[in-house]
């Protein structure tokens, strides 16, 4: 009996390393910066995210494009229809393969910097990026992933250049940048 309790405790502590991890949408944030008229930049975000990291480290983040929030309803609608075509392409995806061991081995409060190849899919077009991330173990059942440097997405990689031009015309702007920095703060919880 004396040997049973330490073995049971060790099993319980190891469970989160073997569990699937799910994104806490309420505590997570995905934002991007648009620049128009040469030097006027604004921050926008997506309100609804779904994410999971399975026990083998396969990570998948699904972004509901209809959840775009720029703070101006008419602009939200224009971007949803003219740029993202949410009727035909309702979601964007981010996929990666993680080595969960170093992350799940962190003690609560400990951090780990890592570089990770990620695949981004928007409007059925994929492009690869190298993400610089900071992983923080919050407690035994949660960790946080933050981009240390924004990912700079280019509209032409995803077939969005014509949509950007349509937005520029309808808004009567001199220019809209085709390069968009994207940043994220994501909280994952084991289940």
Image (cartoon, grey):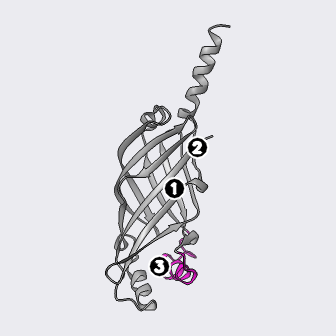
Using the rendered image of the protein, determine whether residue 159 is visible from the camera's viewpoint.
Answer: no
- Disc 2 and disc 1: Cα gap in Å? 14 Å
Q: Residue at x 37, y 52 (%)?
A: 148
Q: Main secondary structure of the magenta part?
A: helix
Which residue bears the numbered disc 1?
61
Would you say the residues marked 3 and 1 are in contact, meaning their CB atoms lie under 8 Å apart?
A: no
Could you tell whether 79 is left or right of 155 in the image?
right
Q: Earlier in the sequence, mark 2 or mark 1?
A: 1
Q: Residues within 10 Å of mark 3 (few under 14, many from 20)?
A: many
Q: Residue at x 53, y 77 (%)?
A: 80
Q: Earlier in the sequence, mark 3 or mark 1?
A: 1
Q: Residue at x 40, y 81 (%)?
A: 164
- Disc 3 and disc 2: Cα gap in Å? 33 Å
Which quadrant would residue 166 be assigned to in this image? bottom left
Q: Which mark is residue 189?
A: 2
Query: Between 13 and 52, which is closer to the camera in this rendering?
Result: 13
Magenta stretch holds residue 2: no
| Residue 35 picture location, percent across and down | 37, 76
Relative height, residue 138 to residue 42 (above, below): above
Magenta stretch holds residue 86: yes
Q: Residues within 10 Å of mark 2 (few under 14, many from 20)?
A: many
Q: Which residues are magenta?
A: 71-90
Which residue bears the numbered disc 3?
83
Q: Residue at x 49, y 48 (%)?
A: 59
């Amino acid at each position: 009996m004396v040997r049973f309790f330490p073995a049971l405790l060790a099993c319980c502590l190891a469970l989160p390393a073997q569990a699937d991890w799910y994104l806490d949408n309420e505590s997570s944030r995905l934002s991007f910066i648009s620049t128009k008229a040469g030097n006027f930049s604004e921050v926008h975000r997506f309100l609804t995210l779904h994410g999971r990291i399975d026990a083998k480290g396969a990570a998948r983040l699904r972004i509901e494009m209809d959840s775009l929030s720029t703070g101006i309803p008419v602009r939200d609608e224009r971007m949803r229809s003219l740029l993202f075509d949410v009727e035909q392409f309702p979601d964007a995806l981010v996929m990666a393969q993680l080595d969960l061991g170093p992350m799940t081995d962190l003690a609560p409060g400990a951090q780990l910097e890592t570089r990770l190849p990620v695949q981004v899919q928007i409007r059925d077009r994929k492009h690869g990026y190298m993400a610089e991330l900071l992983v923080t173990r919050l407690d035994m059942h949660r960790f946080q992933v933050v981009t240390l440097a924004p990912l700079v997405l280019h509209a032409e990689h995803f077939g969005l250049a014509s949509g950007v031009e349509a937005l520029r015309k309808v808004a009567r702007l001199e220019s809209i940048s085709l390069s968009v920095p994207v940043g994220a703060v994501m909280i994952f919880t084991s289940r």
